[in-house]
Amino acid sequence: MSFLNFFGNRKKGFFEPALGLYRAAVAAARAPEFYARFGVPDTPDGRFDMIAIHVFLALRRLRQEQGPARDAAREIAQELTDLLVADMDRNLREMGVGDLSVGKQVKALAAAFRGRVAAYDAALDRPDDAGALAEALGRNVFRQAGRAPEGGINRIAEHIRTVAAALTGQPWPSIAAGTIVFPPLSDAPKE
């Protein structure tokens, strides 16, 4: 079954932009540096966490829209969230998870995503508390790894702050068309 067949009839005009944003988030989350240099576990959980971070950053950018674009941004955000959940469902099935437990696991992943969004959002809203984002990353991304390589959590936290700031400057017409540019990890400030 094709990736797009999971979605059926969607609200016209919002699915394609959301799909563009989702594809960009997944591509950014696959940067090898996250896994090789900064210790993100190269596991289904680790990959989910990196996708969740990048989708969160796109959602945060969408939430910034005001005025006439606000309603469209909300629709795209909902489509983007739906894409994440449907992709997790598809991935679980491809990994051989049985039909009876897929629903439970998707619900758990959706709840985990909501929790991460709340934690990362709160941390980014407190720029004077540099440790808040690193703490949230430690609880989520590195929860099963024991601990990240020296400086890995802080480096990823710096990158998230850099990306959030860069996305704020990206124009609404591009975002509305499904084009978002996540700065590469190498553009984040050095330790």
Image (tube, grey):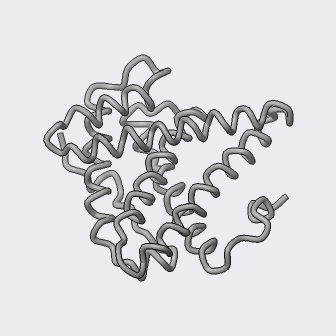
In the image, 60 versus 68, the foreground residue is 68
Q: How many marks?
A: 0
Q: Residue furthest left?
A: 128
Q: The N terminus is located in which quarter?
A: bottom right
In the displayed structure, 78 sits above or below 98; it is below
In the image, 140 versus 59, the foreground residue is 59
> Residue 76, how many percent across, how many down?
54, 68
Whether residue 175 sits left or right of residue 171 in the image: it is right
Q: Quadrant of residue 133?
A: top left
In the displayed structure, 51 sits above or below 36; it is below
Q: Residue at x 58, y 32 (%)?
A: 43
Whether residue 103 sits left or right of residue 171 in the image: it is right
Q: The C terminus is located in which quarter?
A: top left
In the displayed structure, 52 sits above or below 162; it is above
In the image, 83 versus 63, the foreground residue is 63
Whether residue 15 sits left or right of residue 53 in the image: it is right
Whether residue 97 sits left or right of residue 121 in the image: it is right
Q: Residue at x 36, y 42 (%)?
A: 120
> Residue 100, how many percent across, how many down?
85, 32
In the displayed structure, 61 sits above or below 36; it is below
